[in-house]
Amino acid sequence: AGVKSYAAVDLGASSGRVMVGSLGPDSVELTEAHRFPNRPVRVPEGLRWDVLALYGGVLDGLRAAGQVDSVGIDSWAVDYGLLDADGALLGNPVHYRDARTEGVAEKVWATVPAEELYAATGIQYAPFNTLYQLTAARASKQLSYAERLLLIPDLLTYWLTGEQGTELTNASTTQLIDPRTRTWSHGVAERLGIDLGLFAPLRQPGDPAGVLRPEVLEETGLTGPVPVTAVGSHDTASAVAAVPAAGERFAYICTGTWSLAGLELTAPVLTEESRAANFTNELGLDGTVRYLRNIMGLWLLQECQRAWDEPDLGLLLREAGTAPALRSVVDAGDEAFLAPGRMPERIAAACRASGQPVPSSRGEITRCILDSLALAHRRAVADAQRLADHPVDVVYIVGGGTRNALLCQLTADACGLPVVAGATEAAALGNVLVQARAHGLAGDLAAMRRLLTRTQPLTRYAPRGDEARWRAAEARLAAR
Ligand code: LFR
């Protein structure tokens, strides 16, 4: 008695999974029911998500999960599907790495200057923010036919339940939300000619989002009613919720395709310095703000693995472990690495352009990527503390990067702070916790985190004290 189970659907840029979380008063267990690839598809119009395949994966996963007390969905941010007046999907959702947003930001800033946009929304510049995507699509037939826009997790929720909503944490990544009022920024939308009527009403994490439709029950073999619960539907919001922190003096790095590095705050930082440093104020659970910077993350390595046709990460990490340390570094925040393709060549070119030795073997390139990520983590953690006037004593790493011990150790070294590695499936864990809370688990964010520190294995990495070498590497990048 007292143990309930929840299905967490977590869709990442390279794979989706359905995890089952079982929660008792003093236990949290997470098991994988189903995992499936997420393969973007390049068609003549550009790079698209295969969203029907993803939905198929979700249904397979729910069938594998078996009877649960609730379902929650999170995914990557900013992307969306458009629906016509009958509720039918208009085309395949555009991938945020698609080239259609190139040069669009400058057009937007001619109407609403970047400074004003930041003061109103607190969202960092990234070419793929929904606001820029909608501007890029302005003249498209598809948008003119659209009656409704649903962000990816909201679209899948709609297919599961028939109910439409816009979950708040993910809505904040559209760059159309005011982080002070935590509702739509009508001023920005009006000036840019974006129709906020396209969006379904806002939902808070924990809100009910309907029940599985009869057809879904039949396809998955579940017995109804099975409620779907809104969670922090932005994967990073769910992952931050699962950071096993005590107190407030901590930084976090959510690692995966991206590294999202920063702080949890109670109010946004909207200063000009913060904008210049490209920090974002995305919305988190329970009135929090996720003050962080996007860093290219393990994408750099994934794209090299794709180029080398080398799926064995362990092998590459062993090669990197024997390659010389901090020989060459690249700016892992550089937009030049955003698009897919030719990654080893692009890394080499960046090293050459900054006058550093050019890494050539796979081990050297992997080492360059890991050193560069650790360096970017160091800068983000230091900048965030300074800009938010919020000092920290520890850095938590969650997500896929927790499996990469070398990256965790290098991050501790670079930050000069202890690193604690938590859950690998952090987004799914945060997803489950929010569902559990909506269905009877007591407590605020701090209480949820106490449950995690009591029940989850943590790995500690102490900094090895080579501050001078990291400072020198930082200077090499700044000098270019
Ligand atoms: C991570 C993430 C980041 C977002 C990027 C694009 O999976 O959600 O937070 O900036 O994907 O949506």
Image (tube, rainbow, N blue to C red):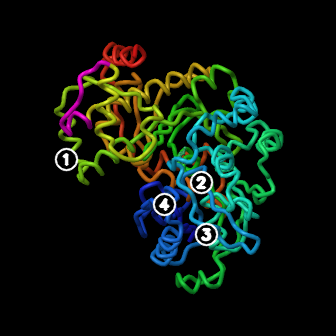
Identified at 64% across, 33% down, the residue is: 106
**In the image, residue 288 lies in the stretch drawn in magenta:** no
Q: Amino acid at mark 4?
A: Pro
Q: Amino acid at mark 3?
A: Ser
**Which mark is in front, 2 or 3?**
2
Residue 43 rendering spot, x and y as whole percentages: 47, 62
Q: Quadrant of the N terminus?
A: bottom right
Residue 3 rendering spot, x and y as whole percentages: 54, 67
**In the image, residue 357 lies in the stretch drawn in magenta:** yes
Secondary structure at badge 1 equals helix
71 or 449: nearer the viewer = 71
Mark number displayed over residue 44: 4
Identified at 51% across, 43% down, the residue is: 243
Left or right of residue 205, residue 127 in this image: left
Mark number displayed over residue 315: 1
Along the polypeptide, which appears first: circle 4 or circle 2? 4
Mark number displayed over residue 79: 2
In the figure, 412 relative to 319: above or below? above
User: Does the beta carbon at disc 2 come under 8 Å from ligand 1?
Assistant: yes
**Which mark is in front, 3 or 4?**
4
Residue 223 rendering spot, x and y as whole percentages: 59, 84
Q: Amino acid at mark 2?
A: Asp
- Range drawn in magenta: 355-366
Along the polypeptide, which appears first: circle 2 or circle 3? 3
- For disc 3, the marked residue is 70
Contact between marks 3 and 4 (CB within 8 A): the answer is no
CA distance separating discs 1 and 2:
34 Å
Identified at 34% across, 47% down, the residue is: 303
Left or right of residue 49, residue 350 in this image: left
Secondary structure at badge 3 equals strand
